[in-house]
Image (cartoon, rainbow, N blue to C red):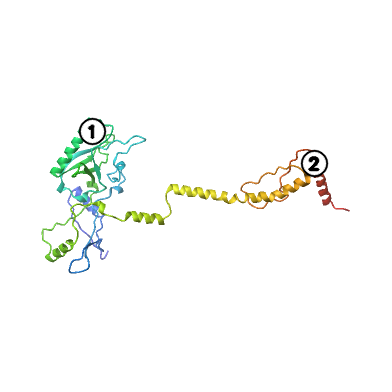
Amino acid sequence: MLGTEVDLQQVENNVFAMETVLKAWLQEQGGDAEHLHLLLPSSSDSPLPVCLKCDMQERLISPALVPVTPSLGVKTESIQNFLPVVRGNQSPAPQRLKVVKVLHADGVCESVLYGLPLVIRPTTCWRLDWDEMETNSSLFHALCHTLRSRDLFLLLQVESDRSAAAGSGVYSHYILQSSSSLSLLLKPVVSRELLLPCSLLVSNQEPAPSALHTVQGCLSQLDEEFVLNPLLLSSNLYQHLRSRGLQAPPRYPYRLQSAAAKRGQQPQTLESPRQPVSRHLRQPQTRQLGSNTRVRATVAPLPSSYVGPPPAKASRPALSFLSGSRRAPTQHKEQDDDSDSVPTL
């Protein structure tokens, strides 16, 4: 027990304080090495870039680690992940989100938002009549204009399943943001159960003049854009996938099936040229018998799997004759064979 350090913490007498202490154990507290190097353009004084060494910290527990159904908004890669789960061949019903609060845009922290955003637009479903569709578009336009003019966000909650027992359902929350166009942006927001503690330092002091001069000099060398255009950003993903596809073997199912089919046909192609050879070896015997005995013989074919020399004389198939008058030569030959096998005294 020598050299053991004990960390004594005073915790307030409430549930949230205990949650904060237990969740802090999930975060890395050590300072053995920095996690991130932020490189700024080199200043005029030095040719080397200015390096800012930083640490990183998780802000929330990933909802993918929580095995619950339905999910807590973790899957936002497609519209099918957002729609409710249906059974059988039924068509998915629309997801129902209920507006619970109005939020100011400057009061929403981006660190509590996660997942891929979804763009919300007025529906163009053909099942609606023209009057209903026109009324719906007018209301949607009014909502976008109100949120944009007042700089407001909406807090949404998934409507609980009525079939589930009271208090047993799990539901997620979303933030609805306005835009300059006739559309809204939907993002999942973390809940209390998944939020990790994070101590954000606030400083009221001005930075050091030398450091401020260095950082401002580095940023002045960068190009300034008023609008972020993702079309101008390239991650070299297409070239990487192309080079990886040329180097790696095919992993698609239909390619594997075609390769297996070709492998299954190889034994047949190897056996096919050998079959005429065995037939060619049996032809002289048949012709010789036909010239001596003048009978018509029927020879049973060899199995397709047999590959090798013709069978021996003992395993030759029996001959079938057409008439009984022509048996004499064969019987005489058999007698000669028997006479040869009997010793002469």
Q: Residues within 10 Å of mark 2 (few under 14, many from 20)?
A: few
Q: Is 226 above or below relative to 179?
A: below
* Residue 18 makes an appearance in the image: no
Marks 1/2 in contact by CB < 8 Å: the verdict is no
- Judging depth in this view, the residue of 180 and 72 nearest the camera is 180
Query: Which label sits on residue 173?
Result: none
**Residue sitting at x 22%, y 44%:** 185
Distance of label 1 from label 2 (alpha carbons): 100 Å
Location of mark 2 (residue):
327
Quadrant of the image for the N terminus?
bottom left
Q: Earlier in the sequence, mark 1 or mark 2?
A: 1
Instruction: Say whether residue 135 is left or right of residue 77.
Output: left
Q: Is 250 above or below relative to 36?
A: above
Q: Amino acid at mark 2?
A: Arg
Instruction: Say whether residue 302 is left or right of residue 119.
Output: right
Q: Residues within 10 Å of mark 1 (few under 14, many from 20)?
A: some
Farthest-out residue, right: 345
**Residue sitting at x 80%, y 40%:** 326
- Judging depth in this view, the residue of 199 and 77 nearest the camera is 77
Q: Position of residue 97 (x, y in %)?
A: 23, 38
Farthest-out residue, left: 205
Q: Position of residue 143 (x, y in %)?
A: 17, 39
Q: Position of residue 344 (x, y in %)?
A: 87, 53
Mark 2: secondary structure: helix
Instruction: Say whether residue 329 is left or right of residue 18.
Output: right
* Residue 327 makes an appearance in the image: yes
Q: Position of residue 96 (x, y in %)?
A: 25, 37
Mark 1: secondary structure: helix
- Judging depth in this view, the residue of 332 and 61 nearest the camera is 332
Q: Amino acid at mark 1?
A: Met
Location of mark 1 (residue):
133
**Residue sitting at x 50%, y 47%:** 261
